[in-house]
Image (cartoon, grey):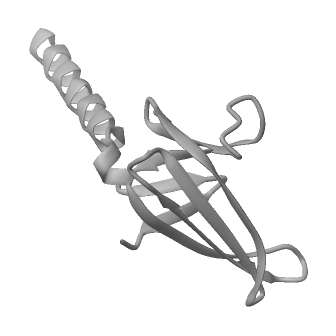
Amino acid sequence: MKCCKILIAFILLGCISLGLCACSFTEEDIIGSWKCSYIYGKDKNKFDVSFTLTSDGSYVKTVVKNGENSSTEQGTYEIVNSKVHLYKDGDRFGTVTTYEYSYGRLVNNGHKFKKVG
């Protein structure tokens, strides 16, 4: 019985370690361009969202809705734990969008962004 408890403890520890490894990343992992496409709303609008993170800590984000340019924003970003925070216009007290790094993708609100460059 004691051996079984020890074995279960080691298995759980291994699973936790693997989970933590999947979430850790470096700045080099996120620098580049990221893209995601999705359909949203009852009108089935198609959105193509892309943003580029640069080594100087800035970003540019573009949203295309149904094939037409919808919006562009720029600002700064920072890495906090397993997340990337984008600060519109570089204002850390204003609009912030948070992406969680998970298995090589940046995820926001269920939308999974793939690195394209």
Q: Quadrant of the N terminus?
A: top left
Q: Name the residue rendered at 68%, 31% in the picture.
A: 92
Classify residue 25 as left or right of residue 33: left
Q: Name the residue rendered at 63%, 63% in the picture.
A: 61
Task: Estimate the x, y position of residue 5 in percent, counting from the top left.
Answer: 20, 15
Which of the 4 quarters of the picture holds residue 46?
A: bottom right
Furthest residue toward top: 2
Furthest residue toward bottom: 67
Furthest residue toward front: 56
Task: Estimate the x, y position of residue 18 in percent, counting from the top left.
Answer: 25, 38
In depth, the one of 41 and 16 nearer the eye is 41
In depth, the one of 108 and 93 nearer the eye is 93
In depth, the one of 10 and 42 nearer the eye is 42
Furthest residue toward left: 3
Figure check: 73 above or below 22: below
Classify residue 71 as left or right of residue 49: right
Which of the 4 quarters of the picture holds residue 77?
A: top right
Q: Name the residue rendered at 47%, 44% in the picture.
A: 57
Task: Estimate the x, y position of residue 76 in percent, counting from the top left.
Answer: 58, 44
Q: How many marks?
A: 0
Q: Name the residue rendered at 24%, 30% in the picture.
A: 17
Classify residue 36 as left or right of residue 7: right
Q: Quadrant of the C terminus?
A: bottom left
